Amino acid sequence: MRRLGRWLKWGLLALLGVFLAWQLWLFGWVLAWKWVDPGETRFMEIRLSELRTKEPGARLKHQWLPYERISPHLKRAIIAAEDARFVDHEGFDWDGIQKALEKNQKRGKPVAGGSTISQQLAKNLFLTPTRSYFRKAEEAIITLMLEGLWSKRRIFEVYLNVIEWGNGVFGAEAAARHHFGVGAGQLGPEQAARLAGMVPNPRYYDRNRNAPGLARKTAIILGRMPGAEIP
């Protein structure tokens, strides 16, 4: 029994060491990306791998664009659609989470997540689309790192440049060119609202561009945009 206890103790210490090493690795990347623009995120790696199973030579559509060159209409649309309290909260919108839980309980299935822009960015940078308690816990830790080390402007700049906007389409510049044939700096209010409406399910809306639900969401987002506060 004593030998078993020692093995358990060393096993737990080893697991703790691996966990701490992983967190330090994540922290190092978050710190570096405070100044250096991320190249390829975890989500991009996953999508590229999926595309290459069907087409070995497939490439992602992605082009980095500095924050000041992205249309303010798109910035307002994303805030209005995804995280109205972004500039005020510290990574988590507790009211939004509570409302999402109530909505999910009412529907009897997960239909709302309540994730902030910071949480979505944490997931996109390092994690996978799969849902689990461990992933949510890791997402929360990374969110705290982002909020502690980066400014709101930097969080939003990276978010706009790395989120998915279609099949193999990532970032505002690639999205604007893919869907409207213009640069992200030339997007008008309605185009911006439409792109913002696509964010929760971008690949579906890329295949179904005339979906009635997207038109309704676009109209709602347009109405909210004048009150959106951007960093």
Image (cartoon, rainbow, N blue to C red):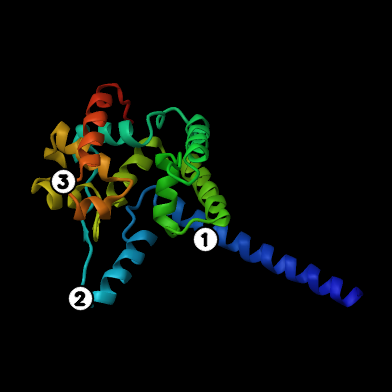
Taking the view exactly as shown, the residue that stands out farthest to the left is 181
Question: Residue 45: percent from the left, percent from the top?
Answer: 34, 66
* Number of residues whose C-alpha sits closer than 10 Å to that of mark 3, classed few (under 14), some (14–19) or many (20 or more): few
Question: Residue 69: percent from the left, percent from the top?
Answer: 18, 40
Q: Is residue 41 visible?
A: no
Question: Disc 3 or 2, which lies upstream in sequence?
Answer: 2
Q: Amino acid at mark 1?
A: Trp
Q: What quarter of the picture does the C terminus occupy?
A: top left
Q: Is residue 155 visible?
A: yes
Question: Residue 142: percent from the left, percent from the top?
Answer: 50, 49
Question: Residue 98: percent from the left, percent from the top?
Answer: 53, 33
Q: Is residue 61 left or right of residue 16?
A: left
Say if mark 3 contacts mark 2, CB within 8 Å.
no
114 or 149: which is nearer to us? 114
Q: What quarter of the picture does the N terminus occupy?
A: bottom right
Residue 210, disc: 3
Q: Is residue 67 left or right of residue 130?
A: left
Q: Which residue is mark 2?
A: 57
